[in-house]
Amino acid sequence: MSAAAHGLAAPPGGERTASKSQLAYEWLHEQIVAGALEPGARLVLSQVADKLDVSVVPVREAVRRLEAEGLVTFERNIGATVAGIDPTEYLYTMQTLSLVEGAATALSAPSITAEDIAAAREVNERMRVFLEPDPLHFDPVEFTALNREFHSVLFERCPNPHILDLVHRGWNRLKALRGSTFSYVPERATESIAEHEALLALIESGAPTAEIELAARRHRSATLDAYLAHTGENPGFPTL
């Protein structure tokens, strides 16, 4: 399905300062990672070019960049389509993030203030309210944005910049892999909110950093386990 068929809005004219290829790349990248262009959606280059008011050439260049990043695939007799989640790559990313985010959260814990705890609880409450209409039918991308906001409060005070950089890379990689795991396992949303509160309670009580790290790792791994159980995928590697 084309971008036009999805009813996607063209970017403002003021954003034309970048090269046309970069403009096309940034716009398509945003549509894909935000879920506006879903896995399997066809990218008809001429229609994307019309939408962005550019020629087909820069769109083709942009699509090739997205293909190199694993966000787009080319299929014979079909052309360019939005790629689906690679279960092995997802497993690698989630396992790595479980380790580094757990460590970053534990290292941050001694520096987390009462104000930080209150801010994280406020975000967690917004997540809970967000699910109130229907805990199984909600905007997974928006929920994931709140989820990242919550966890950022807990890991951003990590004193080790190398670990913190790996955490940021992991979150960005997850976004590139396709926006939100919660679109596949929405039941994890309610469970995550409860686990968030348990993690906050550990930090607030001054629990040992090893205990905090383990709780943070298990929280991340539970989402990975739920996704793998839902998809029936078994990439051949043990989960944490």
Image (tube, grey):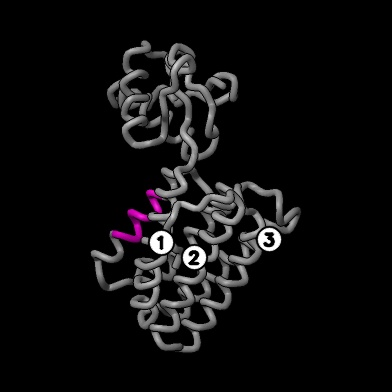
Residue behind mark 1: 95
Q: Nearer the viewer, residue 235 or 111?
A: 235
The residue pinned by badge 3 equals: 129
| Amino acid bearing label 3 | Val
User: In terms of sequence position, does the residue under pointer 2 or pointer 3 come before the other?
Assistant: 3
Q: Residues within 10 Å of mark 1 (few under 14, many from 20)?
A: some
Q: Which image quarter holds the C terminus?
A: bottom left
Question: Residue 147 location, x and y as percent?
Answer: 52, 59
Q: CA distance from mark 2 to mark 3?
A: 24 Å
Q: Position of residue 70 (x, y in %)?
A: 38, 36
Q: Residues within 10 Å of mark 3 (few under 14, many from 20)?
A: few
Residue stretch in magenta: 166-173
Magenta segment includes 172: yes
Question: Does label 1 or label 2 sit earlier along the sequence?
Answer: 1
Residue at image location 46% in from the left, 64% down from the top: 239
Q: Quadrant of the N terminus?
A: top right
Q: Secondary structure at mark 1?
A: helix
Residues at circles 1 and 2 in contact by the CB criterion of under 8 Å: yes
Which residue is the site of mark 2?
Answer: 221
**Alpha-carbon span between mark 1 and mark 2:** 7 Å
Amino acid carrying label 2: it is Ser
Magenta stretch: dominant SS?
A: helix
Residue beneath the point at 40% across and 61% down: 95
Horizontal side of residue 202 vs 237, given as left or right: right
